[in-house]
Image: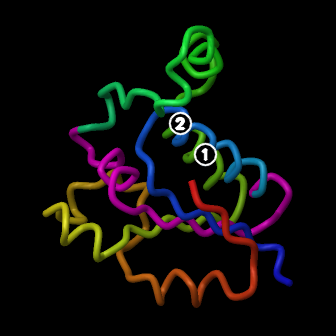
Amino acid sequence: MSDTLNLVMFSGTADKLHAAATLAAGAAAMDRPVNVLLQYWALDAFRTERLAESHGLAWDAMTEGTARPVNGTKSIPWLETFRMAKELGQVSILACSGSLDVLGIDVTTLDPIVDASGGIATFLMNAEDGQIVFI
């Protein structure tokens, strides 16, 4: 089995974006290659016009006291953590071409941290037999 970490990001909430970025940075720091596939709401969060907006929290993170890990600490913003991950190691971020079509998003409107657009087959070929985590 490959030591590559493959993240499929579906959710665009701040808590999940932060968790995925932290996983990517940790794996990159351990010299593990990382492939990230951005789908739907995660993809939408990477639009340059949406980066500064609040992305909210997942419903299970919104009960009293549970938002503290995301909103109550001085953590590094999720996009900056992804940037650090790319500086630390081999991290590839792919925008799902199907999600781009469904949402009517042009790949050129995404933050330059996104390397390319491609389909599920492209992501799975890059994933090879490595671990896949869905967020």
Report the residue at 44% width, 37% height from top.
13
Placement of 84 over or under 59, stated as above or below: below
Q: Nearer the viewer, residue 102 or 4?
A: 102
Task: Reply yes or no: does residue 97 show up in magenta.
Answer: no
Mark 2: give few (<14), some (14-19) or many (20+) Cα within 10 Å: some
In the image, what residue type sits under mark 2?
A: Trp
Quick one: SS at disc 1?
A: helix
Quick one: SS at disc 2?
A: helix
Query: What is the C-alpha distance between the residues marked 1 and 2?
Result: 6 Å
Task: Reply yes or no: does residue 44 show up in magenta.
Answer: yes
Placement of 130 over or under 91, stated as above or below: below
The location of residue 57, given as percent across then percent down, is 46, 28
Of the 4 image quadrants, the one containing the N terminus is: bottom right
Residue 70, image quadrant: top right
Q: Is residue 58 left or right of residue 98?
A: right
Residue 108, image quadrant: bottom left
Report the residue at 43% width, 67% height from top.
115
The number of callouts visible is 2
Q: Which residues are magenta?
A: 28-49
Q: Is residue 72 left or right of residue 31?
A: left
Q: Which residue is mark 1?
A: 21
Task: Return the residue found at the far left.
Answer: 104
Q: Which residue is mark 2?
A: 78
Placement of 112 over or under 16, stated as above or below: below
The location of residue 77, given as percent across then percent down, is 53, 29
Report the residue at 30% width, 76% height from top.
97
User: Are the residues tagged 1 and 2 within 8 Å (C-beta)?
Assistant: yes
Report the residue at 39% width, 83% height from top.
119
In the image, what residue type sits under mark 1?
A: Ala
Mark 1: give few (<14), some (14-19) or many (20+) Cα within 10 Å: many
